[in-house]
Amino acid sequence: MPDVAPPVVCTPTIAGLEQDDVVAVAPFADTWFFVVDDFVALDETRTVAVGRHGDFLVDGLFLIAFDGSGGVQWSTLLSAGEVVPWLVRLERVDDQVWVIGLDGSNVAVWRYALDGVESVATTIADAWVEQWTPTPSGGLLLGGRTGWGPDSTSVFVELTTDGEELWRGGEDIAAFDHAWGDGPIRRLDGARLLWEHDPRAEPFAGFPIDVGVHWARLHDSGEVAAVATLTGEGGLVTAALRIDASGTPLWSDIRPRVTISAVHPRGDGSIELRGERRECWPLPWVALLDATGDTTFEAQLVDGGGGRFGAFGLDGSDRPISIVATGEAIEWRTLREVQR
């Protein structure tokens, strides 16, 4: 008789979280909630979430600001007009929150004060946006391509705080210090390239070229934080890294089997990474890395947390929460650690 190997047992190495308490809210009458796409902390006790709603197709977006207990402080519905976003993200800039909705060829943007007052609602046409960064004046610099095809060309658009196009062009001519990640990290002083750092190694024979850096952000210190997808042992890995003001690497943090879906930087230099980790099986994942590269929090959501209908991350007090669309309501879920 042949020997039969014992079954492989996977032992998780990071904390597992499951639902602890639920607060369900339905601030809009006769509204069907599709999905919660993203959320970001307004302060230690307030969190704002964005998602999509509609009966059969996406009718628009919604914003809901929660207090620390899941109560609604303010809420509003947003119409995207002809734009039907397939990806929605939030960007906190000082005392404002930008809502960025992408449908591939267009970008719908809104700007809200922390008390829910809208100041911008506009559409940027003919831009396949791949990343953005805040401007010193409180606007946004968008970067991407003119389309998805191989013959598409680069396009950059700078928005003022009022949502107006300050300029648009095929080259990055922004007149302020910033950083981009489009394979390598590029640190720019206005339109002048100060330095470039490429974390990608020489690809293996026959292996596709790495994606490289796809998110980068300049901090007040002059250092640049970045997130990349690289080739590691066994396949692709996620890497977080930090470069000093002169272009010298300070540290890098490699995350095997992690796919990033959202990055939220903080004023203290830390970054919150959200996505999916395939440790024993694919699960929603979050990690908080401080400015020195240390992991101050990391966990997986063992019950799925609503899967593709919700967002999982940290609130303003660094508590892990999930905010999930259930169709007729939005659920604010607090989480507890479980033994596995």
Image: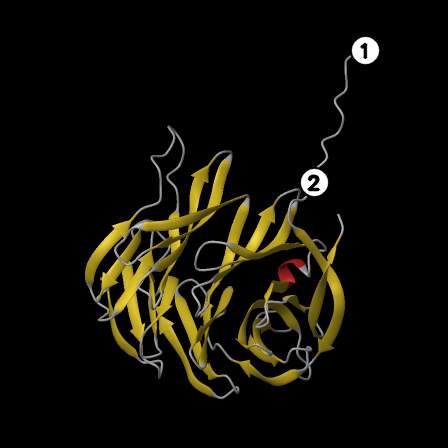
> Looking at the picture, how far across and down is residue 197, in whole percent?
29, 49
Classed neighbour count for the residue bearing mark 1: other residues with Cα under 10 Å, few (<14), some (14–19), many (≥20): few
- Indicate the amino acid at tag 1: Met
Q: Residue furthest right?
A: 1
> In the image, what residue type sits under mark 2?
Thr
Q: Quadrant of residue 209?
A: top left
Residue of label 2: 11
On the rendered structure, is 1 left or right of 242? right
Image vertical order of residue 124 relative to residue 238, above or below: below
Residue 16 is left or right of residue 131, and the answer is right
Camera-nearest residue between 195 and 151: 195
- Residue at coordinates 32% horizontally, 80% vertically from top-left? 164
Label whose residue precedes the other's in the sequence (1 or 2) = 1
The answer to which of 85 and 69 lies nearer the viewer is: 69
Q: Residue at x 36, y 67 (%)?
A: 133
> In the drawing, what numbered circle is on residue 1?
1
How many other residues sit within 10 Å of disc 2, few (<14), some (14-19) or many (≥20)? few
